[in-house]
Amino acid sequence: MYLLFVIKIQKDLELKIIWNKGMSLYIQLTGILQHSVCGLCGNLNGNLGDEFRTRTNSIVSSTTDFGNSWKEDCLCADVEEHVHLCDKNPFRVAWARKTCSIIKSPVFKECHSMVNHNLFYENCVQDACGCELVGDCECLCEAVAVYAKICLDKGICIDWRKPDFCPVYCDYFNIHEQRNNRYEYIYKIKGDWHYQPCLCPWNLRSIENNMEGCYNCSQGEYLDAERKSCVPCGKYTRLFNFCFHKLPVLIIHLISIFSFHIQCIQLIAPLII
């Protein structure tokens, strides 16, 4: 369900990018980079009030102005302010509020005291209002999965997916195997691939070991990307901080017109991400 990219910037400096091949992107930095980054992911200084700092070092309230300021190619046109999606598609408001209400429901009750759900609920409604009819399920499920992931980062594993609500099917990997860079059908069921909402929820700083997905690892194990095998969940000692961006329509536009780049420089100057 996810692609993991690990980029070594300098010794002991590591950047991890995890993409779910859809609308969610996670960026994780080693703690030593705190106060040493800038760009679309903010400055990692622990203050959420100054994240929208532009390239000219001014703070703005508009996500559009913020994104446009970090545009790499001056020949690219600025992104324009977008219409409130529920105002644009009022016929979808009732459906959006009803389906997104799972975030406020007892399903996520254990997480409500740890992560304020109101903002995530409103974001879900906006995303659901803006989805194309053919992509209702994917768009809605991505929005709910964002809240579930934030809960998981707090050590709270929520099993929220159901057969009739945002299901994930893993049986494909039990009857197919990869050959010559493509999956081929096999006639004999092989393996024990199954969906798990989390693997090691107590490893709060190990983002790639703490993701929902299709696994053939048992509980208490995670898939080690380097070893390509299941290993026991152990205490993760390396300290990481990460910034998280859920990608609504606006940010998708930003990614399409802005270069996402890494500039290797000394820590006395900011690292643009």
Image: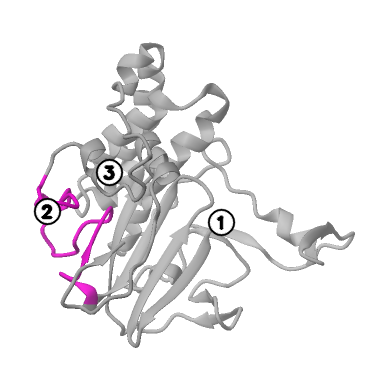
Q: Where in the figure is residue 252, as x and y percent of width and height?
A: 42, 41
Q: Where in the figure is residue 182, as x and y percent of width and height?
A: 78, 60
Q: Where in the figure is residue 72, as x and y percent of width and height?
A: 34, 51
Density class for disc 3 (Cα within 10 Å; few <14, some 14-19, many ≥20) is: many
How far apart marks 1 and 3 lie (CA) works out to 28 Å
Left or right of 4 in this view: 193 = right
Q: Could you say which is closer to the camera, residue 256 or residue 56?
A: 56
Q: Could you say which is closer to the camera, residue 111 or residue 18?
A: 18
Q: State the residue at coordinates (42%, 64%).
A: 17
On residue 1, the disc is 1
Coloring scheme of the render?
one colour
Taking 43 as reference, is 240 above or below it?
A: below
On residue 163, the disc is none
Query: Circle 2 — which element?
Result: loop
Question: Disc 1 or 3, which lies upstream in sequence?
Answer: 1
Q: Amino acid at mark 1?
A: Met
Q: Which residues are magenta?
A: 33-59
Q: Which residue is mark 2?
A: 57
